[in-house]
Amino acid sequence: MKPNKHITLKHLLIHNQKMIGIQFYPDKVIQGLIKELPNPRWSKEFSMVYIVNTKENLDQIFNKFKGVTWVNGNSFFKEKVILDNEPVDINWYRNRTKTTSYKYVPEEYLRKLELKRYALNTCKTYISQFEKFINHYFDKDIITLSEEEIRSYLQHLISQNKSNSYLNQAINSIKFYYEIVMGMPNRFYSIERPRKQQQLPKVVSKEEIITMLEHANNIKHRCIIGLLYSAGLRRSELLNLRVTDIDSKRMLIFIRNAKNNKDRYSLLSHTILKDLRIYYKKWKPKDYLFEGAFRNKYSAESVVKIVRRAGEKAGIRRKVTPHMLRHSFATHLLEDGTDIRYIQTLLGHSSTKTTEVYTQVALNNFKSIRNPLDL
């Protein structure tokens, strides 16, 4: 079989009808077999042959080319990973007071976000971004929009000096509709994403963190700041902690359903354990380790405010965020000589490549280097 002798299936939408696009290198055998498919046509717009997208036609493609050439369906059948978060409540978006001068995200979009159990922040971002997109083309049916119109919208965002992160969020929200809601994986496979920017993690020193703990408003706030740093927790992981996740006998913290649906353990600090015991006696949490006024899960916004205010009181000029405490945990471990593979496990990274970014901010890497001016 020749290296280029294969066909690739793509999702197309032509005249509001789902089609199976067939890409292939010029080959007489393949061309002959394609002619035997049900009503094959050529699209000038997509530069490929297409037939109507039905299960019967898809079966015919695989039967026709079986033993003749490889059918590449990676783009056609690709499916997003279903996340295993707790069910998310986005009924607020359904119950909004609506006007005729604004286009709202379709109900099937909301339903799919719920079925996929995307995190609440992801849902908010997708809904907001997608509504901005469809209102940019207010007078057009969203199902008819083309790749060029999406590119034009992205150019509009670029002209507004939107960040690369913002652009990627916009692309994700758009692709979610066409590929997941409409069931056409990789329909917009050639939409260009902005080049990924490598930003170094921002960290604070151990001394600054100790000062932040000293300036915490109360024991609850002290425990929140202390756990974020001493266990390298993400904000969502802290909020999902339950009272039973603190293992004082083994000095470990159990982190359930973290990023990529992975459970893991992290370190429990003796100092923070003492604070947690004082906190528990005073606040008596029932289920979640940190609870709101009505025994529900503590809010993410409150955690951000607690960390920021403690940073300000500690005299730190930069704005301190919960994630900076996680970055600081990893960096300080690395500076103390901890093996990067252990740090990877504690942070829950899938690859050491992700963890290696901390080698670029660890001070001990630079202290051993003599400045050429001082030689």
Image: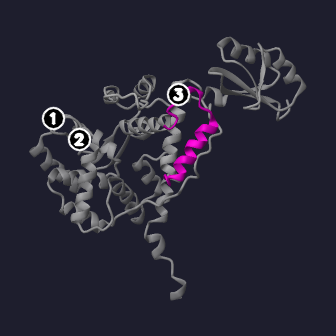
Identified by mark 3, the residue type is Ile
**Foreground label between 1 and 3:** 3
Side of 118 relative to 283 (left or right): right
Disc sitting over residue 69 in the figure: none
Observer-nearest of 261 and 65: 65
**Stretch in magenta:** 136-163
Q: Residue at x 22, y 39 (%)?
A: 243
Side of 11 relative to 259 (left or right): right
Figure quadrant of the N terminus: top right
Residue occupied by mark 1: 294
Residue occupied by mark 3: 180
Q: CA distance from mark 1 to mark 3?
A: 36 Å
Residue 105 falls within the magenta-colored stretch: no
Mark with earlier residue (2, 3): 3
- Which is the main secondary structure of the residues drawn in magenta? helix
- Residue 320 percent location from the top left of the image: 31, 59
Residue 158 falls within the magenta-colored stretch: yes
Q: How many marks?
A: 3
Q: CA distance from mark 2 to mark 1?
A: 10 Å
Element type at mark 3? helix
Quarter residue 364 falls in = bottom left
Q: Residue at x 74, y 14 (%)?
A: 60
Element type at mark 2? loop
**Foreground label between 2 and 3:** 3
Q: Are marks 2 and 1 in contact (CB under 8 Å)?
A: no
- Residue 260 percent location from the top left of the image: 45, 38
Observer-nearest of 370 and 252: 370
Residue occupied by mark 2: 298
Q: Are marks 2 and 3 in contact (CB under 8 Å)?
A: no
Residue furthest toward the left? 282
Mark with earlier residue (1, 3): 3
